[in-house]
Image (cartoon, rainbow, N blue to C red):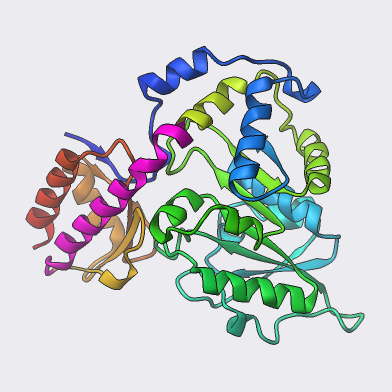
Amino acid sequence: MSVDLRSDTVTTPTEGMLSAMMEAKVGDDVFGEDPTVNRLQQKVASLFGMEAGLFVPSGTMGNQLSLKVLTEPGDEVLIDKTGHIFNYEGAAASFISSVQIHTLDGERGKLTSDILQDTVRGVHDWEPRTSVIAIENSTNKGGGACYSRMELKALREFADDYGLSLHLDGARIWNAVKATDIDPRFFGSIADTMSVCFSKGLGAPVGSMVLSTEENIVKARRYRKLLGGGMRQVGILAAAADYAIEHHWEKLSHDHRRALELAKTIAECSQLSIDMKTLETNILLFDVKEGRAESALKKLEKAGILMVPFGPQVIRATFHHQITDHDLGHVKSVIKKLFD
């Protein structure tokens, strides 16, 4: 028996999703004529309280298009040191937008207005001009941590006080909404640009979306074409994303429950450790007390359990809608056998 907990990107389309893809009405999206993607862009923008949306192939492109429309060459972007944009996007911000990334020591991947104090630069000619705060919700390397309404409001107020833009990397915003019960439209009052992913928690095969003002989306659409992201009959993929919103979003609470149940088992193992207070969504991070994560992962792999290293002694497990309670029971049994 094999259980893949490496990421929530490893899902495959369900029969219902494949049917929706096959039945999608399509057109040439470079000409703006694909009715399915046009409808999805309007739907998701409205859902998150934004004016417009743009379907893109990946979350990385979504983040980079957002930074591109918010910055000028030589600007600086403030971000937590564990942020996806800094760690997992190939230094794209410097390559594409010619901006500098300034990393900060946040709290489980989150920034606060206190942490941001005295970080804004640009008064002197020799300083980079700070122009954007980039945040992630939920956090990846922070173990699935979510921002509260109060934290987000404080960040927005800080940005307004210093004339900064705020970009929200919402790759797993669907999990954050489910965990915090925040109205999705609230995020539109916080972020100037926002990216949301359909291929992580929701389980679509491909795709993300940039959300912002109509003016910014016009700019982003041009940059998307420049970067090779203009697609043709993309309604096939948009249909999968729409199906995922309608049928898989509600299942995320089960992913969160299963992650918590596994965390409880890990906490009971003498060779492992985990901070139970960090469990909020579908991601859990735990430590190997002796030895390295890689050796523990090899033991798990031999038993059919796949996870990923997140540090010399840190392992990440990520739940998704195709992990069942039966799968969870098997993982718990294997971990008890190997590490207790």
Main secondary structure of the magenta stretch: helix
Q: Residue 258: image x %, image y %?
A: 24, 51
At a point 61% along the width and 51% down the height, the residue shown is 89
Residue lying at 36% horizontally and 57% vertically, measured from the top left: 281
Query: Where is residue 324, by image quadrant?
Result: top left
Seen at 54% across and 24% down, the residue is 239
The answer, for residue 2, to whether it is visible in the render is yes
* Quarter of the image where the N terminus is located: top left
Instruction: List x then y, in percent, for residue 45.
Output: 65, 43
- Camera-side residue of 243 and 339: 243
The question of residue 148 being in magenta is answered with no
- Residue 340 pos. (x, y %): 8, 63
Q: Is residue 127 above or below residue 333?
A: below
Q: Is 19 displayed left or right of 285 in the figure?
A: right
The percent coordinates of residue 98 (x first, y second) are: 81, 58
Residue 197, quarter of picture: top right
Residue 61 can be seen in this image:
no
Q: Is residue 264 magenta?
A: yes
Of 301 and 201, which appears nearest the observer?
201
The stretch in magenta equals 244-270
